[in-house]
Image (tube, helix red, strand yellow):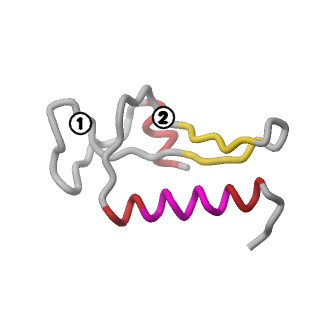
Amino acid sequence: MQRFMEEVLGIEKRAFPNGRLGADDDGEFAYAITVDPSCRAIIIRFPHPTGWIGLDRKAAEELRDNLTQKLLELRGITA
């Protein structure tokens, strides 16, 4: 959460752990995932406008796992 807030405020250090993917690559960033039970939706919040994201295998698996956890939460299943 600290990294997310630093990015919102624009004070984070830009990092490119796997190299730059292109001229418009802004580097790695944090995101927040939550469930809104009132509209039964999973919300993914980015710290700034984002046109695209590139994920290595580990990051893609983490996103998948986070989304699966939130989907189970939305279904009322506790893990």
User: Between residues 30 and 12, which one lies in front from this camera angle?
Assistant: 30
| Dot 2 crowding, Cα within 10 Å, few <14, some 14–19, many 20+ | some
Q: Which mark is residue 47?
A: 2
Residue type, mark 1 in image? Asp
Give the residue displayed 47% in from the left and 63% down from the top.
62
Residue 12: image quadrant is top left
Q: Which residues are magenta?
A: 61-70
**Number of numbered markers:** 2
Instruction: Judge from the rendering whether residue 18 lies leftward or rightward of residue 55; answer left or right.
Output: left
Query: Outermost residue toward the top?
Result: 49
Q: Please name the predominant secondary structure of the magenta segment in the image.
A: helix
* Residue 15 in the figure: left or right of residue 9: left
Circle 1: is it few (<14), some (14-19), or many (20+) Cα within 10 Å? some
On residue 12, which mark appears? none
Question: Mark 2: which amino acid?
Answer: Pro
In the image, is 18 to the left or to the right of 53?
left
Residue 29 point in image, percent of width and height: 39, 44
In the image, taking residue 70 as reference, residue 11 lies left or right, namely left
Which of label 2 and label 1 is nearer to you?
1
Q: Does residue 67 lie above or below 21 as drawn?
A: below
Q: Earlier in the sequence, mark 2 or mark 1?
A: 1
Q: Is residue 68 magenta?
A: yes
Which residue does the numbered mark 1 point to in the structure image?
25
Position in image of residue 77 (x %, y %): 80, 66
